[in-house]
Image (tube, rainbow, N blue to C red):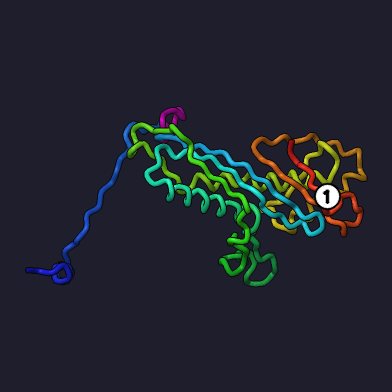
Amino acid sequence: GLTFKDLVTTAYLMRTKLWAAGYYRTEGLHWDGASMTGAPFKYFSYGVACAEVEVDGFSGTPTLRRIDIVQDVGDSLSPLIDLGQIEGGFLQGVGWMTQEQLLWDTSDGPGRGRLLTQAASTYKLPSIGELPPVFNVELLERATETGVVYGSKAIGEPPLTLSICVREAIRQACAAFGPSGREQHLGMPATAEATYWALSDARAAVDAPEDSSPALEEAGTMAVQQGDPTVPDGRQAADEAVPAVR
């Protein structure tokens, strides 16, 4: 008889394709661009995340302490794969929010305008060292989606957007060093340097009580700031942990 290897070799030499391709057309989708009406999407993916972050009051270095996520994946086809996708997508988003800064050449030379951080060797990527000690992920129960493959939803990209809670937790932790109720600006991404300058701005506002910026209430994020005995004003002791969100 003909072996599989011989079959493949013969087909290759005869330029015969050994695979087939198909395309799935989701039913029920329609959109009218003129009236901006219709149903352009089959479903929406929902999720919620809560981040607990600790910020070093001296260096500005943020540290993830705990992450809790609940994600809607419909009826999961493979829970372990979906959990891994959620964890990986979320950590990728954390990299975008806190480490992966885009820097451009601003010199007057021929390289002006060139992206300097164009590869993983030129910026910091999240690693296992950035994983929080507590990382809880749950799949939303009883979330069957009708009209899709076995009631499931795609999960490759939605978790990335949940990482905004980490950035907001860092911002609120920085705000805890300043006057109560003051909105704190924080650069993006929230690198250790950006966090340091946000801390400095918050401390400076303590000596400027006339700054009465409205507080910005954020839901779904939690943050903790920890002081350092080497901070010049010494307002926070090293063993103190002050909740930045109630």
Confirm whether residue 233 shows in the render.
yes
Residue where numbered disc 1 is placed: 201
Q: Is residue 38 magenta?
A: yes
Measured along the vertical axis of the image, is residue 139 above or below residue 233?
A: above
State whether residue 157 is above or below residue 28: below
Circle 1 packing at 10 Å, graded few (<14), some (14-19), many (20+), is some
Q: Is residue 234 left or right of residue 41?
A: right
Quarter of the image with the N terminus in it: bottom left
Dividing the picture into quadrants, the one containing residue 217 is top right
Start-end of magenta stretch: 32-41
Q: Which residue is at a point 30% across and 40% down the rendered structure image?
A: 25
Front residue of 200/150: it is 150
Asked if the magenta segment contains residue 246, the reply would be no
Residue at 89% over, 44% down? 206
Is residue 40 visible to the viewer in this orientation of the structure?
no
Residue 19 horizontal/vertical position (percent): 22, 58
Q: Residue furthest left?
A: 1
- Work out which quarter of the rendered image holds the C terminus and state it: top right
Residue at the spot x=70%, y=68% of the render?
107
Give the secondary structure at mark 1: helix
Q: Quadrant of residue 181?
A: top right
Q: Is residue 2 left or right of residue 39?
A: left
Per the picture, the main secondary structure of the magenta-coloured stretch is: loop
